[in-house]
Image (cartoon, rainbow, N blue to C red):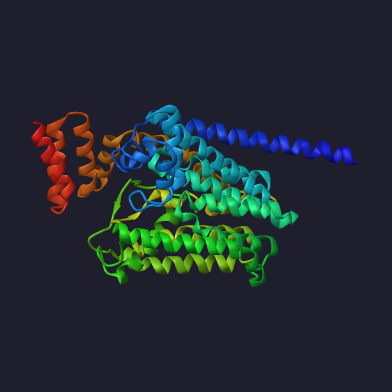
Amino acid sequence: MSEKKSVLRLTFLKRDWFLAGIILVVTFLVFSPVLKSEFLFWDDDANVTENQDVKVLNAASVKHMFSTTVTGNYAPLTTLSFALENKFFGMKPGIYHLDNLLLHLLCTLLVFLLIRKLGANLFIAFVTALLFGIHPMRVESVAWITERKDVLYGFFYLLSLLLYINWYQKKKIVYYGLALLAFALALLSKIQAVTLPLALVLIDYYFDNKFSLKKIGNKIPFFVLSLITGVAGVILLQKQGTLETNTVMPFFQRIFIGTYSFCVYLIKSYWVYQQSAIYPVPDKLSILFYLSPLMIIFVATTIYRIFSDQKIVIFGFLFFVINVLFMLQIVGAGTAFLADRFTYLAYLGLFFIFAWILNYLIEFKTEKPTWGKTLAIGIATLTLAAPLLLTPGRIHVWKNTKTLFADVISKYPNVSMAHHNLGLYYRDQHRDDQAVESYTRAIQLNPNGYRTYSNRGEVYFEQ
């Protein structure tokens, strides 16, 4: 009997890895155009090409990485990964893009393993991981070299969750220690990892079907690391001058910026519309901003009333909430209020719900076919197929600085940063007249942009 069970288990494992392989192959093929993309004149210079710690890797540079910030962000492990790439391969953008893609593939694999570890069936794990892998909202995190932070912290975050579940189920202290170590590495990759202790609480709920304050104790080390990192991050942003509460608009209005952003992220998980590298804060809030809290209340209430006994739905929605909550720009860092990259891990929860609903519809048995079921399955199929068409087009937009910011300007013509960065691209290409034109437009939109004045002056001097 035991031999028969071993054969069955081996068969199931082979099936799991076969489907995981399909997911990884499809994701790689969808994202493969990114390998031909270039460095961008948008933080790639500060983080990689002009970063002295990346150019020269030694003990002093490593010490400097772990004791300073880059553009206000403390992500020393990410900077170290750039330095290692430069050490062995030089400043070849294809290598950096390849490593971003490989890390994304690892994250996609970990998503598949995590959903299986949570006890979901193979179909649910397959759909969740496939959506995570190829969704258009993933493009910014994968195609932008600077956002190595996302795929690197995502890898360690997901690894920590898996290790914690192993500890939860087997009670072997080694898994707990490794989960804590993976969390520390996630924090060193990106501050957004501070939400992991809350995700661990959700995992306890998922397995116990209830929230228990008694189990918070074993997460104290995680919460301590999270608190220290969060406080340090706020201080660093304040020193950098990028933490804003009233400079763009009053704090009261920023609350509606946050609730509106939440609704946009919720909608874009299934209906991806007008993606942009920059979403500028509007000069005046429309009625939709003020109605957005009502939509959140409606969604939350509906989920509670209809799905309160479905732990997958509750877990998935709350996982989305905790991973997007601190990115809603209520206390804003910069002038943009939305970013596709903010959803990198958060969407895992929503994709989990979608896969569960699709699985339920397929398995739902009736005496004869119903139009409702057929329509729902058709919509679900289109939702899965859409990324195969949308994602490659979005990757092309991220090919270089010109394609990226021409796309931004086509949607938001009055973003001075887009014109400024386009000027940097034209200057690098020795197209001085176009560079001056872009810088001049940026100055018209932002007369206080001293770097733009300086760059335009340098072009005049060279001429």
> Between residues 236 and 274, which one lies in front from this camera angle?
236
Q: Is residue 279 visible?
A: yes
Q: Position of residue 454 (x, y in %)?
A: 14, 44
Residue in the picture at 33% in, 50% down: 71
Position of 396 with respect to 178 (left or right) is: left
Residue in the picture at 25% in, 62% down: 248
Position of 370 with respect to 139 (left or right) is: right
Residue in the picture at 38% in, 38% down: 54
Position of 51 with respect to 444 (left or right) is: right
> Between residues 300 and 185, which one lies in front from this camera angle?
185
Q: Is residue 135 above or below residue 217?
A: above
Q: Position of residue 305 (x, y in %)?
A: 58, 69
Q: Image quadrant for the C terminus?
A: top left
Q: Is residue 389 visible?
A: no
Q: Position of residue 422 (x, y in %)?
A: 22, 39
- Looking at the image, which residue sits at the far right? 1
Q: Quadrant of residue 106?
A: top right
> Between residues 138 and 77, which one lies in front from this camera angle?
77
Q: Position of residue 452 (x, y in %)?
A: 16, 45
Q: Is residue 363 above or below residue 4?
A: below
Q: Image quadrant for the N terminus?
A: top right
